[in-house]
Image (cartoon, rainbow, N blue to C red):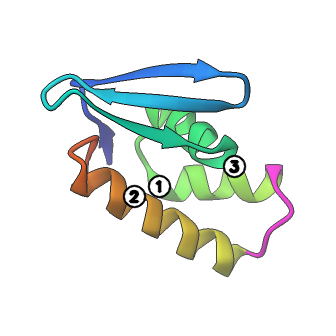
Amino acid sequence: MQPSPQAMLQITGDEAILLDLRSEHYFGLDPVGTRLWQLLSVDPELGAAHGALLAEYDVTAERLEQDLLALVAQLADAGLVTVD
């Protein structure tokens, strides 16, 4: 999975706002979503991001997987990431 080159990230505290330059739509990210975006910018492997987030947050692996897949689907629908 790759962040779109058309997506601009603006971090505000522990949250972030993504701007899709093509559509000029904004997409808000909570702290976990912001961290996911940062991790994917370094390593596009969702499994690596899952492992890092699991170590950083108090959450079960199953719950984190469900939440990440839902967020990735939203980001993909908005054209902010491409899924290989």
Part of the protein shown in magenta: 56-60
Q: Which residue is mark 3?
A: 52
Q: Residues within 10 Å of mark 2 (few under 14, many from 20)?
A: many
Residue 61 vertical position relative to residue 9 in the rendered view, above or below = below
Closer to the camera in the image, 9 or 27: 27
| Overall secondary structure of the magenta section | loop
Give me the disc on residue 46.
1
Residue that appears at 77% across and 75% down: 60
For the residues labelled 1 and 2, say whether their Cβ atoms are less than 8 Å apart.
Answer: yes
Residue 61 vertical position relative to residue 58 in the rendered view, above or below = below
> Upstream in the sequence, badge 3 or badge 2?
3
Task: Specify the quadrant of the image occupied by residue 65.
Answer: bottom right
Residue that appears at 74% across and 59% down: 54
Look at label 2 and name its amino acid.
Val
Q: Secondary structure at mark 3?
A: helix
Which mark is nearer the camera, 3 or 2?
Answer: 2
Count of numbered labels shown in the rendering: 3
Q: Which residue is mark 2?
A: 72
Determine if residue 26 is in view: yes
